[in-house]
Image (tube, rainbow, N blue to C red):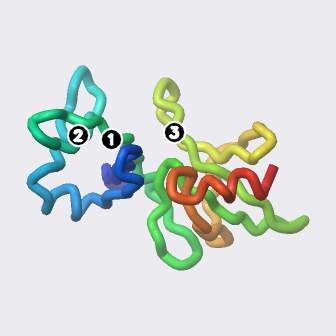
Amino acid sequence: MRENKFRAWDEELGKMYDGEEMEARGDLKAWLSYGKLCIYRIEFSEYVELKELQYTGLTDKNGVEIYEGDILKVYLLDGEENFKVHYEENRARFYFEDFNGSDWGMAHSNEMEIIGNIYENPELLEENK
């Protein structure tokens, strides 16, 4: 069974927070609301909602944990291709989506490598269209 881990993207500050940092900071709060995880940064008594990104339970070929929103280089038999990692909540599954919109189930392969994520490295999305 995979661990339930999350990280969070703060669009306003352009910052990614990992789980350890979220636990250590007094200005970041997380709770369940109607069965959905909500993560907020509190600034001047205002709540700024962050984008929660779930851990897939997989690691790349370097042992780095793969999260929703990551961009992976996947080494296929006929070459390499980049994919975005998505979570489909209504079907409770992770899947890869290539930059042309086609998707396929999450592979169990050690031939995947994280090269960035869609929030901190949006230029990778443009390079691969």
Q: Amino acid at mark 2?
A: Tyr
Q: How many discs mark residues in the rendered view?
A: 3
Residue 127 drawn above or below residue 104: below
Give me the residue at 44% from left, 56% from top. 57
Within 10 Å of the Cα at label 2, are there few (<14), some (14-19), or many (20+) other Cα atoms? many
Residue 60 lies in quadrant: bottom right
The secondary structure type at the circle numbered 2 is strand
Q: Which mark is residue 87?
A: 3
Residue located farthest toward the top when viewing the structure as drawn? 34
- Left or right: where 1 falls relative to 89: left
Amino acid type, mark 1: Leu
Residue extending farthest front:
44
- Label 1 close to label 2 by CB (< 8 Å): yes
Of labels 3 and 1, earlier in sequence is 1
Instruction: Tell me: residue 101, above or below residue 54.
Output: above
Front label number (2 vs 3): 2
Specify the label residue 40 is tagged with.
2
Q: Residues within 10 Å of mark 3 (few under 14, many from 20)?
A: some
Q: Give amino acid for label 3.
A: Tyr
Q: Is residue 38 left or right of residue 86?
A: left
Give the number of the disc on residue 50. Answer: 1
Asked whether the residues under the numbered discs 2 and 3 touch, taking CB atoms below 8 Å apart as contact, a structural biologist would say: no
Image position of 111 with respect to 45: above or below:
below
Q: Position of residue 121 (x, y in %)?
A: 58, 59
Q: Residue furthest right?
A: 78
